[in-house]
Amino acid sequence: MKSCIRTDDWITITKLIFDNRGCDNCIEYLENKYNFVIIGYPESGLGYMVVWNILTKKAVKLCRMAIPQGIEFIDINDDRAIAKIVPDNLIFEDLVN
């Protein structure tokens, strides 16, 4: 397993999520499994996505994104729903090339 995840890998993982239309919350890439959640404002369709490695808890937050139509997301004001899905022990990484 890799010690850090490159920016290109996070981009590929994000692309896999959107290619799958967000239907499966577990994405496999380079023999690792990743989970994700999209959190946003229903009124504007803007928000952010958190993606994390299920095993290592390494994560990235993609901010200021337009949520594609048809993609399910959690209302940004629903703290309970967010807390149920997003682990509190995530390790947010700086992106590296």
Image (cartoon, grey):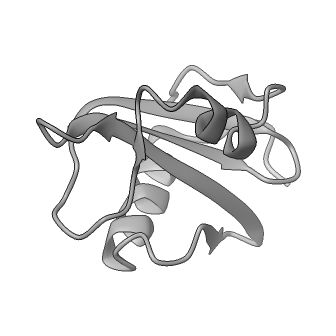
Q: In the displayed structure, does residue 71 sit left or right of residue 55?
A: left
Q: Name above or below for residue 24 compared with residue 6.
A: below
Task: Estimate the x, y position of residue 15 in percent, counting from the top left.
Answer: 36, 64
Residue located farthest toward the left when viewing the structure as drawn: 44
Q: Name above or below for residue 19 compared with residue 43.
A: below
Q: In the displayed structure, does residue 42 sit left or right of residue 33?
A: left
Going 67% across and 59% down the picture, which residue do you hit? 34
Going 39% across and 52% down the picture, which residue do you hit? 73
The answer to whether residue 62 is seen in the rendering is yes
Which picture quadrant has residue 68? bottom left
The answer to whether residue 97 is seen in the rendering is no
Which picture quadrant has residue 26? bottom right
Residue closer to the observer: 82 or 31: 82
Going 56% across and 20% down the picture, which residue do you hit? 94
Residue closer to the observer: 30 or 25: 25
Which picture quadrant has residue 45? top left
Q: Name above or below for residue 47 compared with residue 74.
A: above
Going 42% across and 69% down the picture, which residue do you hit? 22
